[in-house]
Amino acid sequence: MNPRTRNAACIAVLAFAFALVARSLKRNHDRFADCPASVDPAHVHEQRGETLSTPADPYENRPTAVVYDIFTETSGRLIGRYTHLSDRAQDSADRERWWRKAMEVRTAKRAVPAHDRDQLIAHIQQWTAEVEALESEE
């Protein structure tokens, strides 16, 4: 395929992708056009006869996708720390212990649904505390 044909094909694919994104944004905008700019979650739950039992969300002004990114980065930091400790272990028992911990974090990360904000935040807090504890020991 010559370069001009390849470039034209790339441009066509990008234009199609942008059209899909624009259509999706338009559909969501139309769907939520009547919603107020900010909604107090406590008020919504109050109207339903429910109470909020979850603690304050430290990421309340962030979309769940960003919380998931923080979750992923935090798990990566902890796995990296455990892997480093495994690599630097003096004996095979310690090496295996740290490697097992790294694999446990990886397994836990894979088990949490990307849309479950409460679980994401709980793991972020737990793993951040573990990273901080490991860093303070050094």
Image (spheres, grey):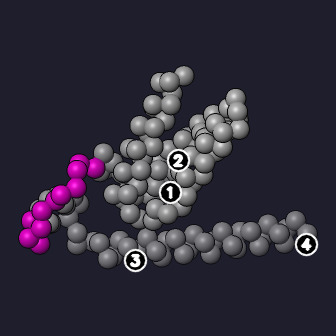
In the image: residue 127, left or right of residue 5 = left
Closer to the chain start, of discs 4 and 1, is: 4
Element class at badge 2:
helix
Q: Is residue 126 in the magenta section?
A: no
Label 4 vs 2, first from the N-terminus: 4
User: 88 left or right of 135?
Assistant: right
Residue beneath the point at 50% across and 24% down:
137
Q: Which residue is mark 4?
A: 1
**Residue 46 position in % (x across, y down):** 9, 65
The residue beneath circle 3 is 27
Sequence-first tag of 1 and 2 = 2
Mark 4 is surrounded, within 10 Å at the Cα level, by few (under 14), some (14 to 19) or many (20 or more) other residues, namely few
Q: Nearer the viewer, residue 63 or 111?
A: 111
Residue 49 to residue 98: above or below: below
Q: Dividing the image into 4 quarters, which one contains the N terminus?
A: bottom right
Between residues 95 and 1, which one lies in front from this camera angle?
95
For this view, does 92 lie left or right of residue 130?
right
Q: Main secondary structure of the magenta part?
A: loop
Q: What numbered label is drawn on residue 108?
A: 1
- What segment carries the magenta color? 46-57
Looking at the picture, which amino acid does disc 4 mark? Met
What is the number of the mark on residue 75?
2
Marks 1/2 in contact by CB < 8 Å: the verdict is yes
Tag in front: 4 or 2? 2
Q: CA distance from mark 4 to mark 2?
A: 43 Å
Quadrant including the C terminus? top right
How far apart marks 3 and 4 lie (CA) works out to 37 Å
Amino acid type of disc 2?
A: Ser
Mark 1 and mark 3: span between their CA atoms? 35 Å
